Image (spheres, rainbow, N blue to C red):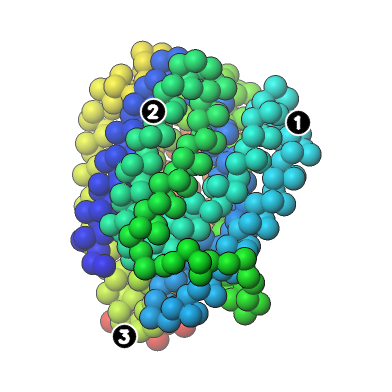
Amino acid sequence: MKLGKTVLYSGLITFSKTLAGFISTKVVASVVGPSGVAVIGAFINFIAIVLAFGNGAINSGIVKYTAEYKNNIQKSFKLFNTALFISVVFSAICCVILLIFSNYFSILIFTTDKYSYIIRCLGFFLLFYALNTLLISILNGRGLINVYTVVNTIGTFVSVLLTCALVYFYKVEGALYALIFSQSLMFIFTFYFFFKKTEFPKKNFKLTYNKIIGKNLFSYSFMAIITALTMPVSQIIIRNLIIESEGTDQAGIWQGIMRISDAYLLVIVTALGTYYLPKLSSLKDNGLIRKEILQGYKYVIPVTFVGLVTVFFLRNFIIRLLYTESFISMSELFLWQLIGDLFKMTSYILAYVMLAKAQVKLYIATEIIFSALYVFLSYIFISFYGVVGTTYAFALNYFLYMIILFIYFRKLLKIKNAEFKF
């Protein structure tokens, strides 16, 4: 799969997700307002954390080894079955934990125990999240981006219909339920198209565990768990800092700019995830790795720059289109948020190199350090500048992250056939 073709398919996925996101965001913002958006944002962060533990945090490992075992069907099914076993066991364990500690998690995430039943519901449906992620990771590793595109497009629009209906009838609670049920619906479509469009027979999928492959998959778990914890947890902390300093509505304004940022960067992030991780995992020659990195920058930097400039000049239109007049103060947050996005995407290509080559120590160190720095900078800047200070912290944090990665990979980037040990 070529990068250009991957970007095209990623663009289709992004278009469908963005359009669906526009509709659901508008409905949610209109019905529940900024404070409701803040609550929903907190739950999205919590789901990201739970999902990582719910399948053993082996997604990246599945993608990597699916790509490596592409020509060995026997080894591939040992991988798939081991991943299935891990997903079922870990989702069951997490389900029990969510059921027992639902009140505690509700207070931790929402500062109230009134949403404990939402936490329990998430526990019951967690297995569908895990199985959907497993199948998607296999499609990704096999380079079946066309099937991946179909699954995501259909599932996305069904999810947005569910979201609109539940929000209309049940307000904030409806939006939270929609986040849970939509993944279950996505699994139905993924399951159907996976077995319809691939050569994998259902009977070959069994709950068996291979120790060697399991060990290889779990070698990626630590990195994935750190990723799943650092960014969502840092966002939860920052959201609570904003609530304490500026109020819940301002936290909703900040959540709104984060959602816009994620939406327009989705095409790049999707392309990197579907192309670079399996591609870089399969490359052994440093010259070829360097070539892929430079080719990535050839696409990523121009696309990101055009996107952020467009978003900046259309920011007031975008706010009114996606949200309501009560969100118009968000306009002040765009400049430094978008600059931070440019630094973020510039860094991400090298971050994928760390992930693909299992550079565990560097990856974990940078994730923890820069997530903590993001929180610290936000605390400082919020105290001086209010909610706009979070965007200063975001930009500065990713600028420093980008510089550190450039320094570390400088030999690989500058010298054509560099002796760089992974």
Give the percent coordinates (x, y) of residue 118.
64, 30
**Front tag of 2 and 3:** 2
Badge 3: residue crowd in 10 Å (few <14, some 14–19, many ≥20): some
Q: Which comes sooner in the sequence, label 3 or label 1?
A: 1
Residue tagged by mark 1? 103
* Residue 121 versus residue 30 in the image, above or below: below
Query: Which kind of residue does numbered mark 2 sit on?
Result: Leu
Residue at the extreme front of the image, as rendered: 203
The label shown at residue 417 is: 3
Query: Which residue shows up at 49% across the image and 54% down it?
Result: 133
Front tag of 1 and 2: 2
Disc 2 crowd, CA 10 A, few/some/many (<14, 14-19, 20+): some
Question: Vertical placement of 102 versus 250: above or below?
Answer: below
Separation of marks 1 and 2 at Cα, in angstroms = 30 Å
Looking at numbered disc 3 in the image, what kind of residue is underneath it? Asn
User: At 67% from the left edge and 56% from the top edge, which residue is drawn?
Assistant: 90
Quadrant in the picture for residue 382 = top right
Residue nearer the viewer, 189 or 415: 189
- Residue 303 in percent (x, y) is at 23, 50
What's the residue type where badge 1 is placed? Answer: Asn
Q: Residue at x 40, y 51 (%)?
A: 192
Left or right: residue 341 compared with residue 314: right
Q: Is residue 163 visible?
A: yes
First in sequence: mark 2 vs mark 3: 2
**In the rendered image, which residue does mark 2 sit on?**
161
Which one is in front, 215 or 156?
156
Quarter of the N terminus within the rendering? bottom left
